[in-house]
Image (spheres, grey):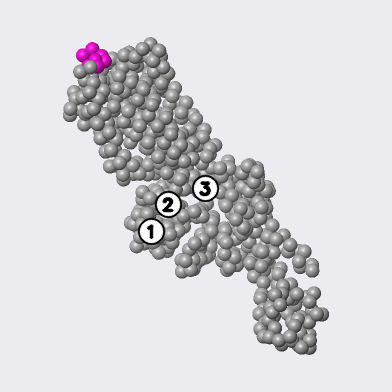
Amino acid sequence: MQAAIRVQALAKRFGALRALDGVDLAVEQGEFFGLLGPNGAGKTTLISILAGLCRMDSGQAWIMGHDVRADYRRARQLLGVVPQELVFDPFFSVRETLRIQSGYFGLRNNGAWIDEILEHLGLASKANANMRSLSGGMKRRVLVAQALVHKPPVIILDEPTAGVDVELRRSLWTFIRRLNQDGHTIVLTTHYLEEAEALCGRIAMLQGGRVVALDTTANLVRSLHDRIHVRITLARGTWPAALVDRLSESDGLCHTVRLSDPGELEPLLAQIRSAGATIAEITIQQPDLEEVFVQTMRGSLTASIEI
Amino acid sequence: MGASISAGFRTLFAKELMRFWKVSFQTILAPMVTALLYLLVFAHVLADRVQVYDQVPYQTFLVPGLVMMAILQNAFANSSSSLIQSKMTGNIIFILLPPLSHIEMFLAYVLAAAVRGLVVGAGVLLVTLIFVPVPFAHPLWIAVFSLGGAAILGAMGLLAGIWADKVDQLAAFQNFVILPFTFLSGVFYSTHSLSPAWQSVSRANPFFYLIDGFRYGFFAVSDVNPWVSVAVLLVALAALAAITLAMLRSGYKLRN
């Protein structure tokens, strides 16, 4: 089966900045794929190249097997993009905006589908409102609707929930999940790692224009499962001298120890008690995607696991 | 695919028309009032002092120039302001994401700009006809030069809109290029009334040919042969179209 998105040795510079430095990636049809990375990692540049908003310096990119340069019409017809910026055309109403966007994609009589999208996104009551009069959340929904007018099989959402309230974020999640269940391939960039962990089946992490991690979300989190953080606060006594080298952090009262196995906890506590100290509080932190992300971005993942 | 090409173009063209139509008070009525004010002031002040062509009173001479000036300025304003606004607000993305070709984009912007120029020009002409009788010697020439002039300035507006990064740059283009070129092209006078040196300077101004040829359509009199003016018009249009299409095709300032 043709990959929904495939990029090969993609490179792009802006002056001295290497925005993309040889990216290889394939997103299969039907996937819910996450693209993570700090600001300036190259996520938006990658999306822009796929969408034809930006020219690549070298490399190749395909949407459903169609080259985004040589066969840009087909490639763009198969792709829906929700941009990061909250942009709108102040001259038009919501329905006019969607009709115009349909027309650009060659669809003249798209009323039934437009009504359906408006309904699903909770925009039906605002259909005839001017874009200017909408709240930020509503404008964001219209952007999602605009990306869907031509029923693209591949949908890219560039931080769709940035600056969006919790309720809208939840309803967008539900909506995007349903699109994915209906067979659309979804690529999501987000700053909320919780969001990526909840939604994405596979994740690529970008840093400095390179893919630094690429795996299923489950595997990425599992890779750190031997990294349990235990925070121990002492009510009385001091931290045993024999255990000082086990500390990863300490401020005198609160001590953090990293364990590779939950079984190590009991002997540790016994040692503390036998040294005459009393424990006031214990917090155990499981690793999550955020931890994976931070470690990956530090580029110290393998090194710290070896310790 | 053929159907979708024309549907994409038709939608962008219709959207560009709707854009100025929705604010027609500002885009159509206001420039008409400006042109009429020019007519009122210049005709009043100069009517008894200037005789440009034999048997053509100054008020009458002035009308085609003012109509052409309205066509040129409004065609330019339409495509340039649409582009710069879309770039500044970021909604240009809605045009860049769909499978519109550079030719479709070019035609849609330029034709919509031409329509606005022609609507304002026709409005100015109709209103001035109430006050000033104007002959229509060669309607075909009138049509050729009004269409050609509107298309040239529509393309120039598109080019300037793509090039400008800020509204001030566009305003500079408008104030330091478009305005002087139209004012010094013989809107208010015949270049025959100028000294030989200034006459040759005027001949280097492409806008002069648009207005002179247009005026020939009304009076059957012009400063230069209208066929020369048509040639200048066609060369200018072809050159501008080639440059603007190349810019759109390469994605210059739009897709980088």
x then y, percent, for residue A107: 42, 49
CB within 8 Å, label 1 to label 2: yes
Q: Quadrant of residue A294?
A: bottom right
Pick whichever of labels 3 and 1 is earlier in the sequence.
3
Q: Label 3 is found on which chain of the structure?
A: A
Q: Between label 3 and label 1, give the one nearer the viewer.
A: 1
* B238 relative position to A57: left or right: left
Whether residue B106 appears in this view of the structure is no
Label tally: 3
Residue plotted at (40% across, 37% down): B79
* A255 relative position to A41: left or right: right
Pick whichever of labels 3 and 2 is earlier in the sequence.
3
Mark 3, Cα crowd under 10 Å, few <14 / some 14-19 / many 20+, is many
Residue placed under numbered mark 1 in the picture? A134
Residue placed under numbered mark 2 in the picture? A88
* A258 relative position to A99: left or right: right
Residue placed under numbered mark 3 in the picture? A76
Judging depth in this view, the residue of A45 and A179 nearest the camera is A45
In the depicted structure, whether residue A232 falls above or below residue A1: below
Quarter placement of the C terminus of chain A? bottom right
x then y, percent, for residue A260: 75, 75
Residue type highlighted by circle 1: Leu
- Label 3 sits on a secondary structure element that is helix
Q: Quadrant of residue A72?
A: top right
- Are marks 3 and 2 in one subunit? yes
Residue plotted at (57% across, 58% down): A189
In the depicted structure, whether residue B74 falls above or below residue A205: above
Q: Which mark is residue A276?
A: none
Judging depth in this view, the residue of B50 and A54 nearest the camera is B50
